[in-house]
């Protein structure tokens, strides 16, 4: 029996992906020759795009690669390739045209035959292919249960691994987020790359990796017409927004922290000392905004109300602005105050006259010049300005902005985010 020091470390040869440094970082290495990779995620999330990016990057290095679609036609795949590499150099496009092969099979149970007859023989058309992608395992008639077809897939895996051919299998997930198919599939592969959808972002995880450490904290990606890339929104940000409860002479503080859960963790909502039904209602309203997806996120929300008074509906707006600020990674000026109840149609309801009078008193006498700007319903702007003028006839103490609904508020706070829509 050899000792640990007597065992020869032969190392693992890799297939480089120089234009995907974020993926190389996530999996901890290049793609290993003979490695079996599983790329999982819900339909339409970008699995095909990422598969083409991987094979394209490897083909640029001069390696021969094969893409086998089971749910798309050859012309469909060609359009994806052209979309991703349309802005690259002629040399890159020439390398991809030379080294990226695309072919189909009638049934996934044919994979062992395909490997032994069209890839491994020296004179076969795909001999020398270094990585094979199958997109997806749910196409071509593969059952999600353990059966003859799955056994044939295992035969293909064993043979490919034995010949040093890397495999990339694309797989769907169930409605509950579990990887589709038998658990034996997850045990067989060397590395699992899992993509989720959260907001307009694509968090990527590597929950299993025999070639390096697992990546359980999300690597945040975005996707444009040329493929997936690392998002500048790498880390979440907490946000604090000022409001007024209408009772004491102090301002309330709404705080929110919107995060992407770790792999295996469920989204959560923590809002201590706040009315649970009201907070869930506000999150539901957020979900009706354009390009705002509140699914699969974790929320930590708190609200400091001076004097330990109970929550009032006029604190709806500062809480929603705090959530948006954290979600969008856009800061809010700490000298801006937000006032108003938010209804189910995204409208900002006006406060009562007694509330407005109390707020005007606080702004003019208790905290002069601490607040530079106030956002509230457009229906009470004139009334509020008169109250301020009555308390301080000379000069304007605060800028008053009236808004109709959340859409107009977002456009006013962060106009560059809605410039394309206008």
Image (cartoon, rainbow, N blue to C red):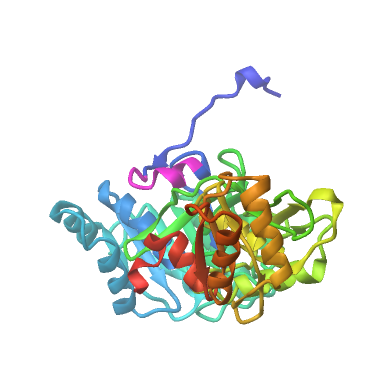
Q: Is residue 330 left or right of residue 356?
A: left
Q: Is residue 347 left or right of residue 74?
A: right
Above or below, 385 relative to 331: below
- The residue closer to the viewer here, 50 or 209, is 50
Question: For the point 62% across and 69% down, which residue is it?
Answer: 173
Q: In this view, which residue lies farthest toward the top?
A: 5
Q: How many marks?
A: 0
Instruction: Indicate whether residue 237 is drawn in magenta.
Output: no
Give the residues in magenta.
Answer: 17-25
- The residue closer to the viewer here, 260 or 105, is 260
Point out residue 104 in the picture as x, y percentages from the top left corner: 38, 75
Question: For the point 49% across and 79% down, which residue is it?
Answer: 107
Quarter of the image with the C terminus is bottom left
- The residue closer to the viewer here, 186 or 280, is 280
Instruction: Indicate whether residue 18 is drawn in magenta.
Output: yes
Question: For the point 48% across and 48% down, which residue is it?
Answer: 34
Point out residue 220 in the picture as x, y percentages from the top left corner: 51, 52
Q: Is residue 339 left or right of residue 85?
A: right
Question: For the point 60% across and 73% down, which residue is it?
Answer: 287
């Amino acid at each position: 029996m050899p000792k640990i020091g007597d065992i020869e470390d032969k190392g693992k040869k890799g297939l480089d992906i120089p234009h995907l440094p974020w993926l190389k970082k996530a999996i901890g290495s290049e793609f290993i020759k003979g490695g079996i990779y599983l790329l999982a995620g819900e339909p339409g999330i970008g699995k095909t795009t990422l598969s083409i990016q991987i094979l394209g990057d490897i083909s640029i290095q001069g390696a021969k690669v094969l893409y086998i679609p089971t749910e798309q036609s050859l012309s469909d795949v060609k359009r994806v390739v052209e979309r991703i590499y349309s802005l690259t150099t002629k040399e890159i496009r020439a390398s991809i045209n030379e080294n990226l092969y695309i072919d189909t099979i009638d049934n996934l149970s044919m994979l062992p035959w395909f490997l032994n007859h069209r890839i491994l023989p020296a004179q076969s058309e795909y001999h020398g292919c270094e990585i094979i992608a199958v997109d997806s395992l749910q196409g071509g008639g593969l059952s999600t249960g353990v059966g003859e077809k799955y056994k044939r897939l295992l035969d293909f895996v064993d043979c490919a691994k034995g010949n040093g051919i890397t495999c990339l299998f694309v797989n769907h997930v169930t409605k509950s987020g579990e990887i589709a198919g038998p658990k034996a599939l997850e045990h067989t592969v060397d590395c699992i790359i899992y993509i989720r959808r959260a907001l307009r972002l694509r968090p990527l995880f590597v929950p299993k990796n025999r070639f390096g450490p697992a990546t359980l904290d999300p690597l945040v990606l975005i996707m444009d017409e040329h493929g997936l890339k690392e998002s500048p929104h790498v880390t979440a940000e907490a946000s604090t927004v000022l409001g007024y409860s209408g009772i004491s002479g102090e301002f309330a503080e709404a705080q929110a922290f919107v995060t992407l859960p770790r792999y295996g963790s469920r989204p959560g909502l923590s809002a201590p000392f706040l009315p649970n039904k009201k907070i869930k209602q506000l999150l539901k309203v957020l979900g009706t905004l354009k390009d705002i997806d509140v699914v699969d996120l974790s929320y930590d929300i708190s609200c400091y109300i001076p004097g330990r008074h109970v929550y009032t509906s006029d604190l709806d707006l500062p809480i929603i602005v705090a959530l948006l600020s954290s979600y969008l990674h856009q800061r809010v000026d700490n000298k801006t105050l937000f006032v108003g109840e938010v209804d189910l149609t995204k409208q900002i309801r006006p406060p009562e006259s007694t509330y407005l009078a109390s707020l005007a008193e606080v702004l003019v006498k208790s905290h002069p010049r601490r607040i530079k700007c106030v956002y509230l319903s457009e229906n009470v702007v004139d009334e509020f300005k008169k109250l301020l003028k009555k308390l301080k006839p000379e000069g304007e103490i605060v800028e008053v902005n009236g808004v109709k609904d959340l859409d107009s508020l977002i456009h006013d706070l962060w106009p560059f985010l809605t410039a394309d829509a206008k």
